[in-house]
Image (tube, grey):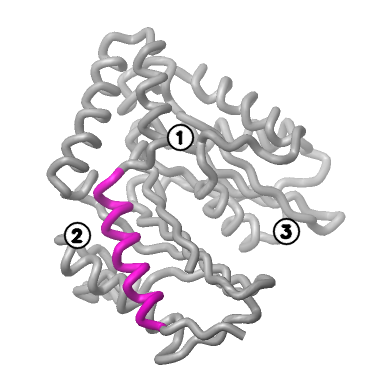
Amino acid sequence: MRDINSNQIQQAVKELFIEANYYLSSDVLKRLKKFEQIEVSEIGKEMLCKVIENAELAANEQVAICQDTGMCVVFIEVGQEVHIVGGTITEAINEGVRQAYRDGYLRKSVVADPLNRKNTGDNTPAIIHYENVPGENIKIHVMPKGAGSENMSAIKMLKPSDGVEGVINFVLDTVQKAGANPCPPIIVGIGIGGTMEKAAILSKKSLLRSLDEKNSNQYYAELEDLLLTKINNLGIGPQGLGGITTALGVRIESYPTHIACLPVAVNITCHAARHKEIIL
């Protein structure tokens, strides 16, 4: 059994959210530069140049990549041999968020009630997904998720007979309807299977995977490539101004499901695909 103090979790969460908001992941920056070279639309190429310049300025000046610094989503894997001392994990995560958004000068965007709309003033509470795993470590993966892209996400309960073509059509329809709203180029996360809520969580979790990392399942790796091609053929382009760079990548996670179900969720993130992780 290994003791981990809740203060370590708090400090890690604080640093991760500040870094995620200031520094664009290297895989995303590399993909943006790749598409800038092959983009056929002149205005699309110019928009990609501006996006890259914005990311570099944010990193150099240590300011937020985007004014929407998101709602804090945390995926945390807790080893079964870990004993948390000094407080609870949930308290530690929320205190880390509170300090990150205060000390990092990040916009507080969370309201305490979805209808009454009063701001909590510190960007808490976070959305936390827990998983118990073997071992004596804690893996924390954070994602500040902006509303512009989150609002364009969708879920649909397909019929099993709809098959892969139904999945493809739903994904393309969702991206087409999103248009310029999620600030393309986007990354498209897809969850397939489980139940309604499981598919939604899978779609968000899929966005944590690096753009350099292929899907471990060959079938889904090929489907990701096919969908990326089809999405970029829609012609939406950078910032919705036309071109072949509507998406930088497609990420799929799947899970077993009921014989009568085919749940599919699409979670879109903008080009500022912010996420950081640490293992304690």
* Mark 1 secondary-structure assignment: helix
* Mark 3 secondary-structure assignment: strand
Residue drawn 58% across the image and 56% down it: 200
* Mark 2 secondary-structure assignment: loop
Task: Examine the image and state in which quarter residue 74 appears.
Answer: bottom left
Residue 104 lies within the magenta run = no
195 versus 208 height, above or below:
below
Task: Decide which of 76, 11 is in the foreground and name it.
Answer: 11
Q: Can you give x and y, in whole percent of width and height, for residue 140 in the image? A: 47, 65
Residue underneath mark 3: 194
Residue underneath mark 2: 106
Q: Can you give x and y, in whole percent of width and height, for residue 83 in the image? A: 55, 86
Q: Residues at badges 3 and 2 in contact (C-beta under 8 Å)?
A: no
Residue underneath mark 1: 177
7 versus 153 height, above or below:
below
State left or right for residue 88 relative to residue 229.
left
Disc nearest the viewer among 3 and 2: 2
Task: Examine the image and state in which quarter residue 180 appears.
Answer: top left
Dominant SS in magenta: helix
At label 2, the amino acid type is Leu
Q: CA distance from mark 1 to mark 3?
A: 25 Å
Q: Can you give x and y, in whole percent of width and height, for residue 174 in the image? A: 52, 37
Dot 1 crowding, Cα within 10 Å, few <14, some 14–19, many 20+: few
The residue sitting at the bottom extreme is 86
* Span highlighted in magenta in the image: 6-23
Residue drawn 21% across the image and 26% down it: 50
Mark 3 or mark 2: whose residue is earlier in sequence: 2
Q: Quadrant of the N terminus?
A: bottom right
Dot 3 crowding, Cα within 10 Å, few <14, some 14–19, many 20+: some
* Residue 43's disc number: none
Inspect this view and state whether residue 115 appears.
no
